[in-house]
Image (cartoon, rainbow, N blue to C red):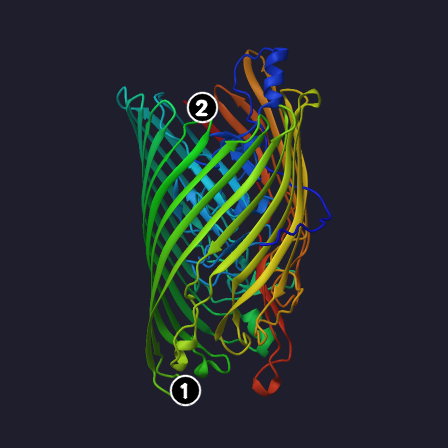
Amino acid sequence: MRICFWPIVGCGVLAGSPLAAAAAGEQSPPSADTTADVMTVDATVNARFVPEENRKIPFTVNHFSDEDLQQQQIKDAQSLFWMTPGLALNSDGQNPESSLKIRGVGSLNQVSSDDTSVVTMLNGVPVPQGNLSSRLLDISQIDILKGPQGTLFGRNSEAGVINMTSNRPTDIFEGYLGGEWGTRHHHLGELMLNTPLTDTLSSRIALQYDRKNAALKNQQDGDKPLSHPQDLSGRGSLSWQPDERDNLLFTVDHQRQRHNAVGMTLLDGHDKISLPKGVMNDRGNDTTLTFNWQHSWDQLQLTNVTGWGHYFHRSSGPFNDYRISQQLYGTDYDSWRTFSNRQKQFFQELRLGSTENSPLFWVTGINYLYSGRTHNYTGGWNDAPGWENDPLDAHIHRRFTNDSIALFGETTLPLTARLNLTTGLRHTWEKHRYRDHWQANPGYANPGDTAYSDKQSLSESYFTGRIGLNYTLTDDWSVYGMYSRGHKSGGFSDWDTSIASGQPATPYKKATVDSYELGAKALIPTLHLELNQALFYNRTHNDHFYALIDPSSSFATVIENFNTESKGAELSATWRPNSDFMLRTGMDYTLATVTHLPQDSQSGGHKGNRIPDVPRWGATLAADYSHPLQLGALPVVFNSSLNYRYSSQREADVGNNFKLGETHLMNAKIGLKSRYGDIYLWSTNLLNNRSPVYGFYYPALDAAYGGTGKDAHVGTVREGRVVGVSYQYYF
């Protein structure tokens, strides 16, 4: 393979966020030595199963601690992704078909819930990424690993990994009780209780309930919110440490979502939708069980990770609201459909490797993943012209089964006193089985049979891995280069409609990516400054896309494969002049384009088109100030933070038919911490930016076919400004 680094224009990204506020109580000025430690400490990341300093990792890692998430008012995964440079999200917040790209790498849209370009890990177990509105409840840290992670994190980490770790039970009785109240009917309550049960056994329980208004207002319901999304999340953990060498952790996570219908409407600068009252319904239930056991020797540790999950999502409502119908057809057309996605998953991994304090890093292991999933669809009715010939005028039942087993290993070897070599390799065997049954509704008018079935399977065997060098210029400066090979399996689409013609489903092809990164990480103690910079180039072959052949008149789909490339630069700087103040700033640039597509592509795309959802420019600014005060006899800590993320315009679809507007997201927080609790005034989306979250292009339909001759830009907009107050009491 030829290594080709392109000249890259632009700079930077912000990776991370604020320092935690100081604890309440009497404060004395820190000593000079303590201040130096505070201002030069390097983030400890969990990128390779053991805690490591970020500077020693030869690729980019965006690190968020639990304090960072609280300061930035980040309560769910979707908010985290919007605030992280280099991540491109296509999601309405509730749709299991959501897709995520890192540095322009990933499916052009989500062709299947199994087509995960980015792996999400929770306590060492991969979890489905479809529901990007999952709550970040009692999280210890999140590390976003950029670039293919095909050595240690599995078969589908084509673009990167979101590695989340929850807080473990401790041997101290503690907890907190808190709540938030805000505009747009925002209500949130949360509870955490950590209890030592014996000298070796501890438990931890965390609960959270959240309710707010949907982003869109319904014109047919007096401009009231379309729905009132509700989320109930909980986690229970048991930690047992029978001796100093063994540590066992059992965790149960559950999330229950109701009334989360978001809706799709015209993107014409308004936050309105037009639907009969109560017609939208969206609900989900996700449960994940994890068991971790670790046995340690002096320089060696054995880790077992076992995970089981059950994930369910159901959505029903119209195909289009009346505003879209008026734009395309000049009249109101009623319609209705429902679909559900149910998945069961089992994961088992054993790995043997070095400990945190070992002079040489290495890890090797084996894992197995089973996933069984059903996707059911029912097209109830549609009054729009052509529905009687639409392949979705039917009931469709699909069954997907995946088995995967892999052997992996990675090590970092010192070649000289300053030069380290990191190399890893993984071999994976996979089998995919697919069944599909299509049953036409009674009014279906196309000739041919009214029922078809399909049964297929695919097998793959492949290598992934990486190799990189890290050179230490000084104790505080290092430079690195990394090459990674990523792979994403082929499979079967959730929305293939070829079966309506009696044809077997056409599998989408396996995708591969060659990724290159050059970077530098540095601490400058004399300036109290931390710098991170990276240049990257990614070349992807056969990534995935599904297109509506003629979305104005039919929901028939076609699955296509594209070649793409992305290149760019990221730069971030953190300045900590004293223990009270911290400033982070950064810029990022990504140019992501289509380099090849099928000759007869029905997507409307062309070679050289920009990849949808990926902004070219971005900037980040985070400022935090914390200072101890004395209010009479009460010692308190004043705490404030301001976090801003800018993203430039981005293309809405692969045809580059229209752009989604600039994003300006600002969150702010100000308040006091004391022994009587923490009270804050806060705001999310302070600038009230209502830019589109995602978009689709519906081409014009000629009057001869019942259309108005007008095209439509459809999608949804982000939630507006929320201002509120929060209180949290610790015990």
Q: Is residue 116 left or right of residue 596?
A: left
For label 1, the SS is loop
For the image, the number of numbered tags is 2
Q: Position of residue 583 (x, y in %)?
A: 66, 30
Q: Tell me how far mark 2 sits from mark 1, CA to CA.
A: 70 Å
Callout 2 amino acid: Asn
The local secondary structure at tag 2 comes to loop
Q: Nearer the viewer, mark 2 or mark 1?
A: 2
Q: Quadrant of residue 614?
A: bottom right
Q: Neighbour class for label 2 at 10 Å: few (<14), some, many (≥20)?
A: few
Q: Is residue 169 above or below residue 442?
A: above
Examine the image and state in which quarter residue 362 appears. top left
Q: Residue at x 62, y 17 (%)?
A: 36
| Residue 357 numbered mark, or none | 2
| Picture layout, residue 125 above or below residue 237 | below
Q: Please name the residue shown 27% across and 19% down the image.
A: 199
Asked if 381 appears above or below 141 in the picture, the reply is below
Name the spot of residue 659 as percent of width and height, x first.
Answer: 66, 61
State which quarter of the image contains the N terminus: bottom right
Residue sitting at x 53%, y 23% = 673
Q: Residues within 10 Å of mark 1 (few under 14, many from 20)?
A: some
The tag on residue 445 is 1
What x and y, as percent, mark residue 730? 43, 24
As rendered, which of 637 and 221 lies closer to the eye?
A: 637
* Residue nearer the viewer, 356 or 217: 356
